Amino acid sequence: MPVNNNCFSSVLLQKAPVRHLVRSFTNGRIAQTYLFAGKESTGRRTTALAFAALLQCQNPTTGGDGSVDSCQNCDSCRRIAAGTHPDVNLITPDGNEIRIDQVREMQAMASLKPGVGRWQIFILDPAERLNVSSANSLLKIFEEAPPHAVFILIARDTGSVLPTVLSRSEIVRFAVPSHQQARAEIMRACALSEAQAALCYSLSEGRFGRSLEFALNFHELSFNSGISQSHTDFLIQTESLSQLLQAEFAAVENLDRALRVAGQIDQKVYFPLQAARKSFCRSLVLNTGLPAAFALLFSENLTERLNSAISVMKKSFDPLLLEAKKSYPSALIKEIEGQFSAAIERWAGSQLEEFFLCLLNWYADALIVACKADETLLLNLDRKEDIITLAKVEGIELLRSRIELLEKSVELQRRYVQPLLILENLLTQIGGPEA
Ligand SMILES: [Zn+2]
């Protein structure tokens, strides 16, 4: 079972990046700046921490295959595992962005000698959330940084960072594993059956790292509820997630901590919602005769819930902002307020995108079956019978147009078109005429 160790042996399905970094270490050629480029959930942060652990380890070991790794036992490895190593700094968004204050703090720390380790390591995750002024400051920091400073930028692709930063970075690429590789690895690493691994993987919508989180806390599921029940369950679980987040915000005591929590809300993985969403989307795609009123009813219900979650979450910061107004300039308070709002709206947007993605994956699977392609390419392999039914009912042309419609819906949501309009248009088209 994978444990949360910061060593290369815990990095799964990423042999090439690990080999690259081990070679850097054994040749004593540590770059000042690395760019870890790859999609989310491919193990970029785990690898960054494993590399940091190796660089700082007091007693690196050599595994059975002859490759070097951190020991996991020395004081340095223990501190990294506890997140308390003074020379390994993980920088994540404070609110919606990695803010200029955070970058300035990093600049000051980079100029100091390491406290206990050999290197001062800064992991920026995700680098695409650096705001314009933060990103512009980076180059200056790289120019001035002493040789013991190592920066690891984590980004989706090389286009997400400024070209001037890119040209100074050593690029380490993280590939997305195939569905089949991912499922086999979940079975092996988490000691699950083939069916259980397939379920965890499909619930993650093909995100390998996230599926491991589900696998470690595996739940059996039933997909037999009809459209009405699965619709209700989905709305209830959406509400439950927003209540969990609200409780988290309510427990925060100061503004710094509130910014940190707001920066992480769209990362929250909530198994019951993933399962309810999968089940509801299954009912939607398989049900061709939805009542005409359903599209509007569902769209209103979902957007109302998200809007009320947005407003409650925003309000929970008011007491902290009010308190801070006594000691900070109003421009700073305004900026921080903007960070909270943007982070919460990003979360609501991500809920819609997850819904679109889940529907899209059902249709994409049906298209694979309709085109008679290899079934190991299916994401929802655990629901093969449903996919075969869907492929028969819809046919290649219709499936293609459904997929286009969903891609378009994601695009519209990113362009801030009203969610109610996007949802209603989508549901009206996929729900089909009244039976
Ligand atoms: Zn060690």
Image (cartoon, rainbow, N blue to C red):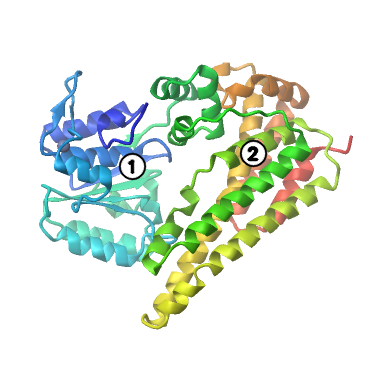
Whether residue 408 sits left or right of residue 57 in the image: it is right
Q: Residue at the spot x=29%, y=32% of the render?
A: 17
Rendering quadrant holding ligand 1: top left
Question: How far across and how far down the image is residue 267, in percent?
Answer: 46, 48
Mark 2 C-beta to ligand 1 under 8 Å: no
| Quarter that holds the N terminus | top left
Q: Label 2 amino acid? A: Ala
Q: Where is residue 190 in the image (x, y as percent from the top left)?
A: 42, 25
**52 w.r.t. 62: above or below:** below
Depth order, front residue of 13/237: 237
Q: Can residue 170 be seen in this view?
A: no
- Which is more N-terminal, label 1 or label 2? 1
Residue drawn at the location 43% of the way across and 27% of the way down: 177
Within-10-Å neighbours for mark 1: few <14, some 14–19, many 20+: many
> Mark 1 and mark 2 in contact (Cβ < 8 Å)?
no
- As drawn, is 322 to the left or to the right of 1? right
Q: Is mark 2 on a helix, strand or loop?
A: helix
Residue 306 lies in quadrant: bottom right
213 vs 430, left or right, is left
Residue denoted by label 1: 45
